[in-house]
Amino acid sequence: MLKKRKNMLDDLDKRILRYLQNDPESSVAKLAEEAATTPSVVSRRLASLQESGYVLGYELVLDWSALGFEVQVSLRVTLDKTEPSAFNDFLREARKIKEVLEIQTFLGMVDVRLSVVARDMEHYQQVYRDFILVLPHISDIEALMHISTIKMDRRLPI
Amino acid sequence: MLSLLDTKILKKLSLEPKLTTSALANSLSTSQPVIWRRIKRLESIGIIKGKRLLLNQELLGFGVKVFLGIKLATKGVISLEDFERAASAIPEVQSIEHVLGLYDYRLRVVSRDIADFERVLRRRIMTLPGVGQVEANVLLSEEVLQGPI
């Protein structure tokens, strides 16, 4: 018989995902306790959730200002869309810049957003001039300087 | 401030956050207690903030992610605080950043579909205290890079 996961999560799956979201470093034993089941059931469910693509993995969360990168800038880029390869060329080159932490693409007023960190304003100027402004097919670029994070909670209301 | 070993640990962990201390010790040819102490120190000085579970948001029914640029109509300490408090209480708002530039705030909003997003935008966002101009951009893709470690 073909073993295929139905595209629906049951209550137990949801409970496990909720607890794991709250505490990604939780052990299987602790998850089992929280979800009121056994460790072997949790292990099986976790393996299945990963296999079916619900759980993609884990991400290390770093504090860049604690690492000495005091300046954080969000660069909103509009590309020259008359050039068919604009997106691919731009993204390929942007990935090579060490100071770029995040690349997002959008549907809207902005095409691409780069999240850039730098040690100080002087370093930022240098990164901006030497690496960002030379990226291909930029038609407009606009900067938002990060002042503070008010809320950062990426958990989903599962 | 960071030793070469610290940097190597951070690099390895940022690529593979679930690496065990013994695997790290093996690949960096040192001992497990050394690695353990280094990681604890990186955590205590605030460099490692923790780990985040990455879920497939589309499969879980949260298919629409939108970034909002918000400009306040009136400024002043009171209105900033009111806005921040009210916006933080919206469950669909995953992040709020105070920024300097064209907008005052940058919000990440997650919703089930476009209709759901419209509901959040009209009932929750547009009614926030002091809210002025709002720009919405729908997220198509995102990738997180290793950064300058």
Image (cartoon, helix red, strand yellow):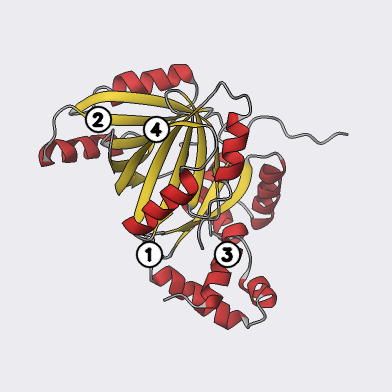
Looking at the picture, do discs 1 and 4 lie on one chain?
no
Q: Looking at the rendered structure, which numbered label has been put on residue A66?
A: 1
Comparing A130 with A72, the one in front is A130
Q: Position of residue A113 (x, y in %)?
A: 46, 37
Q: Of the residues under marks 4 and 3, which one precedes in the sequence?
A: 3
> Secondary structure beneath disc 1?
loop
Say what amino acid the circle numbered 4 marks: Glu
Mark in the foreground, 4 or 3: 3
Circle 4 marks a residue in which chain?
B
Q: Which residue is mark 4?
A: B92
Q: Of the residues under marks 4 and 2, which one precedes in the sequence?
A: 2
Q: Which residue is mark 3?
A: B11
Say what amino acid the circle numbered 1 marks: Ala
User: Badges 4 and 2: C-beta atoms under 8 Å apart?
Assistant: no
Rounded to the nearest whole Å, what is the CA distance between mark 3 and mark 2?
Answer: 37 Å
Q: Position of residue B102 (x, y in %)?
A: 28, 33
Rounded to the nearest whole Å, what is the CA distance between mark 4 and mark 3?
Answer: 32 Å
> Secondary structure beneath disc 3?
helix
Q: Which quarter of the image is occupied by the N terminus of chain A?
A: top right
Q: Which residue is mark 2?
A: B71
Residue at image point 69% right, 55% down = A40
Q: Is residue A145 above or below residue B62?
A: below
